[in-house]
Image (cartoon, grey):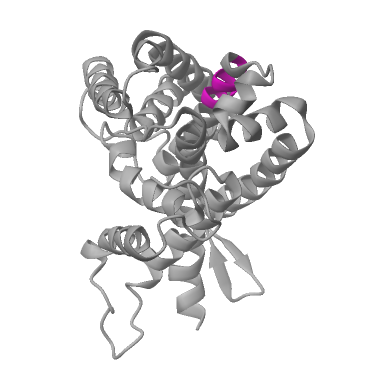
Amino acid sequence: MIEFVNFYLFPALAIGSIYALGAVGISMIFGILRFAHFAHGDLMTVAAYGILAMAAILPINPLLLIPFGIALAVASALAVDRLFYRPLRQLPTIYTVISSFGVALIFRSLVQLLWGSENQVYSSGVTPPLVLFDTFRVSVLHLQAVAATAVIAVLLHYFLTVTKTGRSMRAVADDPELAEVSGLDTAKVVRWTWIIGASLAAIAGAFAALNTSVHPNLGWNLLMPMFAAAILGGIGKPMGAMAGGFIIGLAEELSSYHWIGEGALISPSYKTAVAFVIMIGLLIFRPRGLFKGRLL
């Protein structure tokens, strides 16, 4: 039981936090802009490398440098929306989806051009885990990821339910034509969608990089589990995407636990496939997700 908590449950919650933060942006972008943003993972990578660049200048805790990553991710998101996505807004969705693949390749190529393709880390050395009750050992980073995600979930829920901009975003997600006729500033809503989605992607990218390393495929490797989380929670449902992220993270990590016999139930090499299985199953049997979001 102690082994299960220390080496499976805590890491599962941490990776679930990363999926949750990334899935929120995917869900909001689809809910408001009506297209699947396949460059979202690479937006995480851009932010992670932005933090890496600042870490070389300011040798402090990389978590304190997340605002620099957020600024870079937001600027990048707003730029590609202005240059690539906005001109395609009135065309069929497939044009924007294909464009997002191109944007992903642009981001990845720029990263490789500026920083190279080898793995890099923010700082060297190993941080000892926290020991709780002389029994449980948990990584400080994992606690920080889960705590940050919990705080962000509360703040995001408050923003979407209480503030005028948040309510406008929900209105546009529910019925964009009616929202525009009602006089809502849809351009402002789109802008805030990118700001929030890119900011959360930057935070997710920072935690993902700290958990492993920084490399050009960092965000791309996380894209499909994040899409699975967004679909699981219900497209256009940010809180559902958060819940979906934790469910996908738990399903992936716990699938490699030795539930039956001594060996792993599923080899850790194949645990990413769990997210694909869940996503395909949902698309077949419950396409609107657990929280009844929009249909794809």
Q: Residue at x 28, y 43 (%)?
A: 221
Q: Is residue 27 above or below residue 133?
A: above
Q: Nearer the viewer, residue 135 or 269?
A: 269
Q: Position of residue 147 (x, y in %)?
A: 64, 50
Instruction: Identify the residue at the far right of this view.
Output: 162
Q: Is residue 97 left or right of residue 161?
A: left
Q: Tell whether 222 sits left or right of 138.
A: left
User: Does the magenta portion include 194?
Assistant: yes
Residue 284 occupies quadrant: bottom left
- Residue 35 as seen in the image, left or right of residue 2: left
Visible residue check, residue 41: yes
The residue sitting at 34% across, 13% down in the picture is: 84
Which residues are drawn in magenta? 188-195
**Camera-nearest residue between 296 and 261:** 296
How far across and down, in percent of the image, does residue 139 sit?
52, 57
Whether residue 66 is visible? no
Question: In which quarter of the view is residue 83 placed?
Answer: top left
In this rendering, is residue 225 above or below 269? above
State the predominant SS element of the stretch in magenta: helix
Q: Nearer the viewer, residue 249 or 102?
A: 102
**x and y, in percent, of residue 160 in the image:** 69, 36
Give the quadrant of the C terminus: top left
Would you place residue 277 above or below residue 53 in this image? below
Q: Quadrant of residue 215?
A: top left
Question: Vertically, is 162 above or below 91?
Answer: below
* Residue 67 drawn at (x, y percent): 58, 24
